[in-house]
Amino acid sequence: MKKLAALGALLALAAGAWLALRDRRPTGFILISIDTLRADHLGAYGYPLDTSPFFDEFSERGTLFTNAIVQLPGTLPSHMSIFTGLYPAEHGVYPPDSVLSPEIRTLPEAFQAAGYRTAGFTEGGYVAGHYGFERGFDTFRAVNTGKPGAAGRTFDLVRDWIDTLEEGDKFFVFVHTYEVHDPYIAMEPFGRNSWPGEPPDTWEPTGANLTAASLGELPVTPEAVRYFGALYDAGIRYVDEVLRGFMEHLWAADLARDTTVIITSDHGEEFLEHGSFVHRQVYNETLHVPLLIRRLGQRRGARVSRLVQSVDLAPTLLDLAGIRRSGMTPSGTSLVPLLRGARQATGAEAYAEGMSVPTRTLYRQTDSGLYQLLLTREGDESVRRELYRLDDDPRQQKDLAPRRSALVRELEAALERYRWDVKANAGRAELSEEQTDRLKALGYLQ
Ligand SMILES: [Zn+2]
């Protein structure tokens, strides 16, 4: 009996502060998307270099999801999945010019309708307002704040808006930065610190050059690949400092107790692990992103290894806010039971697809491990199958498909069930010259 009581006490501890704070709902939500941030380049996710000292410390008192997957490694569809809780095929918003149907409700619209003050700050490009991202925000700004240092300037805008809040205001803020996205231009001194000595003599790491190199049209040395990775890491190190300053501001503004901060990304980045740069393929380096959900007043953290995905975010935030009639129809599921310490049942699945490459992929987590099946169309008839066991081989070096044909067949049958209908047809927008130039600068249009 005594043993059982002790076990009960332990379980209560594991549930973290969410139970203790159950009497009060969070009244503020800050959803932060660090575009192009792969999970495994953060210390909290096991990276050996010192890229994220603040995030690592901050996450210790939050709930860190160690297996969070995005739906597609592309800025526009992936963010739209975060905003709608729908898979890309359901919201139908793809680059360069489709626009979310007004029939599909977004997360900021749900918060606004529930009486929250809402504000969105993005750095434009594929997170510009006209795609549907501005809907539901009282204040929406999509400004190219200029690299290096874009993140600092964008978060300054957020601070200014936070300072207009009055006591008792409920609020929802979305913040997005391209700081770590290509072209890799490091903020100093982080750039210098990330690469001792002279930089290698190589081409500029712009989106256009990196894409050309991915297609074999531009030669690259192993040293240059390491250098580009170091510049990318320097970007993360700088963003980490920006986050530190921003959170200190929140504490000083006395918003701490009832505000929930969510830090995630829309996709990762490739450095030739599987033959490509930027974010073209659907391996772990582009699909596995950080996901931290922390109520600032939370005292104890937790790590959740259950497989979760971007479409789960919208239902989670609605659930946390207690918004019942949101008008949204998300396909994801609320993560609140996991935040409250629910047992991490296995049997989870996550689905993703490529855009630059014709690949569909299924992640499945069972008691025997975490697997990823990739099906890539090659020509009209042929399909290439790859199978990886991620808990054993996170870098995906050992393709198990030839040896595990029964599991491949089983996962392929499961993947076939992931076929959706578009919920409402996307419209089309005419891109302005300025918008086209911005997308070119990000390496998206030629
Ligand atoms: Zn992106």
Image (cartoon, rainbow, N blue to C red):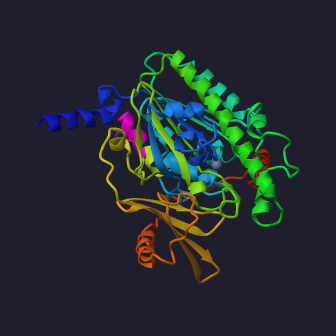
Quadrant in the picture for the C terminus: bottom right
Quadrant in the picture for residue 216: bottom right
Seen at 20% across and 34% down, the residue is: 6
Residue stretch rendered in magenta on the structure = 315-327
Seen at 76% across and 66% down, the residue is: 215
Quadrant in the picture for the N terminus: top left
Seen at 79% across and 39% down, the residue is: 196
Tell me, yes or no, if residue 442 can be seen here.
Answer: no
Instruction: Return the residue found at the far bottom.
Output: 381
In the rendered structure, the answer to whether residue 98 lies left or right of residue 305 reads: right
In the rendered structure, the answer to whether residue 69 lies left or right of residue 235 reads: left
Please check the rendered image and state whether residue 409 is part of the magenta-colored stretch, yes or no: no
Residue 26 rendering spot, x and y as whole percentages = 40, 28
Residue 180 rendering spot, x and y as whole percentages = 69, 42
In the rendered view, would you say 30 is above or below 81?
A: above
Count of numbered circles in the view: 0
Seen at 38% across and 46% down, the residue is: 334
Tell me, yes or no, if residue 365 can be seen here.
Answer: yes
Instruction: Return the residue found at the far left.
Output: 1
Residue 24 rendering spot, x and y as whole percentages = 33, 25
In the rendered view, would you say 308 is above or below 293?
A: below
Using the image as rendered, state which of residue 348 and residue 79 is in the foreground.
Answer: 348
Using the image as rendered, state which of residue 146 and residue 126 is in the foreground.
Answer: 146
In the rendered structure, the answer to whether residue 173 lies left or right of residue 187 reads: left
